[in-house]
Image (cartoon, grey):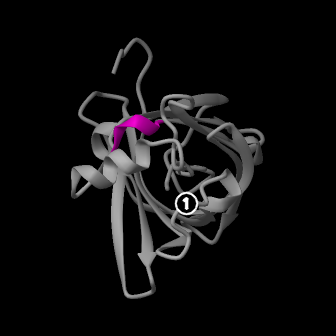
Amino acid sequence: MRGMTIAALAVLAMLGGAPRAHASETYAIDQRFGDIAFKVSHLGLFSSAGKFRRFTGSVTIDEAHPRNTRISVVIDTGSVAMSWQAAADMLRSPPYFDVGRYPDARFTSTRVTPQGSAGYEIDGMLELRGITQPVELHATLRDRHKGAVPGQEIADFVVTGVLRRSAFGMKADRTFVSDKVHLRIDARVRLDPPGHDG
């Protein structure tokens, strides 16, 4: 339910296939060009999808030790949006995200492993509704290019994963709403040149 993402995060272990970092560099995850989205099945007959509109994140890469790449994402759970308002309100309620008590979801990577020339397996911990559970994500580098600002580097990733909402205490409506939640995160990672404030 995305919270995840976190949902999102994964994005990036730019270990080799993405823009080159110097020593230890921190990349910003630019929410203006990305989505943290989720989809759940209902009775195995149809599905519904939503997204989180507000999140922040960063990726820190140690060029000398690329496996030390660290990804951190904070998601505003109250920013959840669905195609109909009643569903979004339901997800903000206590049986689901309980945004009154837990306004944020947080993902922190624990390991990033390259898979081929443009793929990365990302292991991390997701904190949602006060519960922390391990999450596995897969990130694929889709594009890399120079930004509009001289010295700016940009990489676009697609991150996918699956989690079980019951692992985070969301057990309401289990006969109608699947326990399995599919995540898709479209993320843009940006390294700004020194002195640029974004």
Question: In the rendered image, which quarter is residue 109 located in?
Answer: top right
Is 132 on the left-hand or right-hand side of 94?
right
Per the rendered image, the range of residues in magenta is 76-80
Q: Residue at x 51, y 51 (%)?
A: 18
Label 1 sits on a secondary structure element that is loop
What is the x, y in percent for residue 102?
Answer: 56, 32
Against 12, residue 194 (above or below) is above
Q: Residue at image x 44%, y 70%?
A: 40
Q: As drawn, is 86 to the left or to the right of 39?
A: left
**171 in relation to 47, above or below:** above
> x%, y% of residue 151?
37, 29
- Image quarter in which the C terminus is found: top left
Q: Position of residue 82 (x, y in %)?
A: 28, 54
In this view of the protein, which residue sits in the foreground, 85 or 58? 85
The residue singled out by tag 1 in the image is 172
Q: Nearer the viewer, residue 49 or 59?
A: 49
Q: Residue furthest top?
A: 195
What is the quadrant of residue 170 in the picture? bottom right
Report whether 180 appears left or right of 70. left
